[in-house]
Image (cartoon, grey):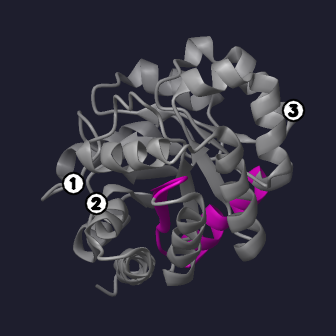
Amino acid sequence: MSGNIQLLSDTLAAAKAEGRAALIAYLPAGFPTVDGGIEAIKAAFDGGADIVEVGLPHSDPVLDGPVIQTADDIALRGGVKIADVMRTVRETHAATGKPVLVMTYWNPIDRYGVERFTAELAEAGGAGCILPDLPVQEAGLWREHAEKHGLATVFVVAPSSKDARLAEITKVGTGFVYAASLMGVTGTRESVGAQAQDLVERTRATTDTPVCVGLGVSDARQAAEVARFADGVIVGSAFVKRMLDAPDDAAGVEAVRVLAADLAKGVRGQA
């Protein structure tokens, strides 16, 4: 492994060595502004996030719920571009030295150019990409360029994924496996329950790659619940909602820091 994929792997291994799950925060680039989004990501790290996923805002985010759709819409109306996403990765990684990934649908990368996107992401210090809608069998071009630039390729598995399909996905994915805890779109849930644990166990049967759970975690209690069986706990909508509900940008950044600190206690079993 080379580049920041190694940093990603080392970060997940360090959390495991501490006997806990890693805390992974998701925040969209350009929300509420490019500068404001950078400050929010720094705050998430400052509060206790180990890894951050930077969302690339998309006009048709089919897997995202209303909270993230609202944030994406604000970012797009503000004119956010892929260059701004790269700047967000560059500045947050440079300021913290921690792993920063991009989460994006395939279409923007395809239009931008795979070689250009992977080269720029690596140059910005990015650790890799989470690609929720890219089928494994169509991922050859992406994987070739990601490998060349030392980037992780994180695929998403779901409760509906059959065991053979899980094996196919985990054979080629790198960094970690993103286990979607529920069928449906992103958003906070009352319970993140048994479906997620079963999916983690079935995924682990096919790979030694860490398995991180996302979709639905919103507080320290739920983070602690998921941390008992997953290698990482991914939180997105809860952070975005705190920012949307804040009276101003500064309050939104502080709300991210506070939530990250609360979730960090959860993954450490201190909630």
Seen at 42% across and 76% down, the residue is: 260
Query: Magenta part of the protein: which range?
Result: 5-31
| Disc 2 from disc 3: Cα separation | 34 Å
Q: Disc 3 residue type?
A: Lys
Q: Is residue 235 above or below residue 269?
A: above
**Is the residue under label 2 in contact with that under label 1 (CB below 8 Å)?**
yes
- In the rendering, which numbered label is found on residue 148? 3
- In the rendering, which numbered label is found on residue 192? 1
Relative horizontal placement of residue 126, taking residue 129 as reference (left or right): right
Please state, as top left, top right, bottom left or bottom right, where the C terminus lies in the image: bottom left
| Disc 1 from disc 2: Cα separation | 7 Å
Q: Disc 2 residue type?
A: Val
Is residue 17 rendered magenta in the image? yes
Q: Secondary structure at mark 2?
A: loop
Q: Residue 1: in sight, yes or no?
A: no
Task: Answer with mark 2 or mark 3, whichever residue precedes in sequence.
Answer: 3
Q: How many marks?
A: 3
Q: Which residue is mark 2?
A: 217
Quadrant in which residue 171 is drawn: top right
Q: Disc 1 residue type?
A: Val
Quadrant in which residue 79 is drawn: top right
Q: Secondary structure at mark 1?
A: loop
Residue positioned most to the bottom = 270
Seen at 53% across and 67% down, the residue is: 36
- Percent across and percent down for residue 109 are 65, 26
Q: Is residue 94 above or below residue 121?
A: below
